[in-house]
Amino acid sequence: MPPFGDIEEGRPSRQNSERGPLLDGPNGNGYAAGYGDANGRIAPRSQGPRRGGFGSHVCSKTKAILLSNYVNTLLIFVPLGIVAGAMKWNSTAIFVMNFLAIIPLAALLSFATEELALMVGETLGGLLNATFGNAVELIVSIVALTKGEIRIVQASMLGSILSNILLVLGMCFFFGGLKHKEQNFNTTVASTMSSLMAVASSSLIIPAALYSTLAAPKEASFKLILDLSRGTSVVLLILYVLYLVFQLDTHAYLFDAQHESGESDDDEPQGQQTALLSGVESGVVLVVVTVMVAVCAEYLVGSIDEIVASSGISKTFIGLILIPIVGNAAEHVTAVVVAMKNKMDLAIGVAIGSSMQIALLVTPFLVILGWIIGQPMSLYFQTFETVVFFVSVLITNYLIQDGKSNYLEGAMLLGIYTIIAISFFVYPDSAGSLGGVPGQS
């Protein structure tokens, strides 16, 4: 989930960056304009401590990192959230503080990932973005899965997908459409991503359809669903790997923003930037931030049961609406900013590409992980959730098929997301529960 910078899902690109002007620099945001070598890689401005010693070098890098994004002002909630959880404060205070703490940590995680991606080349950089692009959702879900909170895991996965293809894409279409009467984007890339999303939605519909036809007792039927889910997850992971090969190698030209815009190879790249951190520095930031996210996620998930008991809000609503807001906040802003700059291919890549990663990579991985640690995580979602997912993918595919967007289409997507959010707010966890089926109560 990137900060205010352009992220093309699965690609370590810094072209057309719109990062906020927080630092002084040749291009207004603290980065020196520069061009890469023949392979497109760009070396960082500085590889070691500057004059003045190691201490001043660390201070300057820390300042640059902290000023990389406006949401880093919320970092004050990281120690507060950890203290609240360690001291066992009120569950509401623990939840709210750690909720707010994860937002800037997500931005820092994305920032460090992008810096590291510039060092390692296109293919490995794409894998890094795929791995860390949805790292917050993954960490929160792993913590919840180890605690047996399968409803939280499933809801957060579905919520991340819905927030990207409805909320984020809707805001891109709406705010971009207010500034530009009509916007165009690459239909080939969009249709490829949406087709993969349709495959992902089928992977949820098939287990639900199979379960409804089984006459065996629920527990016995669910064992069959687990076997189907685990086999399906392997297939989805293979499809995602093939998509990476398709995007980064065999059909990379389709995803090349320069190619799409009609720029020639002789034209100077616009907005290309050097890395602010070296590879080692980026790795250190990734490790430190990942540990802090894991700690905050531990306290966040641990407070959910008491929040549900005291407030009456369902686990499904927390996982489907609130947690995705935490994990995708910086990414949401990025997509809207680039859409208002009329860079719709990039906005589509952020919105649909991120949801595709969740559907084809993160969710299947969690099913396999649950298999390994003995948690019955499956691709069988409750019927209402499955229908909502299918309808959302269908509407999104229909609206992007012509390669054009306007504010009315954005309003449609925002409207359906609002309806879904209201429906899950009034939808109790007990509705459609499967008595005797693990993780579905």
Image (cartoon, rainbow, N blue to C red):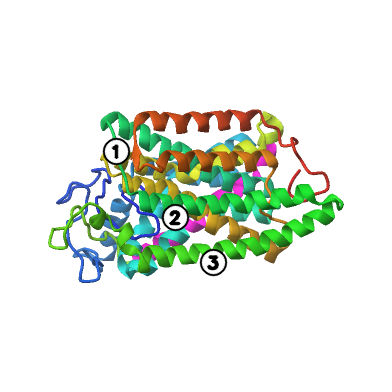
Q: Could you tell me residue 101's position as x and y percent?
A: 48, 44
The quarter of the picture where the C terminus appears is: top right
Q: Rounded to the nearest whole Å, what is the CA distance between mark 3 and mark 2? A: 19 Å
Q: Disc 2 and disc 1: Cα gap in Å?
A: 26 Å
Q: Check the image and name the residue furthest to the front.
A: 402
Position of residue 365 measured from the top left corner of the image (x, y, whole percent) = 59, 61
Q: Earlier in the sequence, mark 3 or mark 2?
A: 2
Residue at 25 percent across and 40 percent down: it is 341
Is any atom of residue 303 visible in this view? yes
The disc placed on residue 133 is 2
Residue numbers of the magenta segment: 281-306
Mark linked to residue 183: 1
Among numbered discs 2 and 1, the one appearing first in the sequence: 2
**Residue closer to the observer: 386 or 441:** 386
Which of the labelled discs sits on residue 141, or is there none?
none
Q: Position of residue 191 (x, y in %)?
A: 42, 50
- For badge 1, the amino acid type reads Gln
- Badge 3, how many Cα within 10 Å: few under 14, some, many 20+? some
User: Tags 3 and 2 in contact by the CB under 8 Å rule?
Assistant: no
Q: CA distance from mark 1 to mark 3?
A: 34 Å
Q: Is residue 277 left or right of residue 76?
A: left
Whether the magenta-drawn stretch holds residue 180 is answered as: no
Q: Which mark is residue 238?
A: 3
- Of the two numbered discs 1 and 3 on the same chain, state the one appearing first in sequence: 1
Q: Above or below — where is 302 with respect to 425? A: below
Q: Quarter-wise, where is residue 286 in the image?
A: bottom left
As drawn, 127 above or below 320? below
Density class for disc 1 (Cα within 10 Å; few <14, some 14-19, many ≥20) is: many
Of helix, strand and loop, which one carries label 1? strand
- The answer to whether residue 1 is visible is no
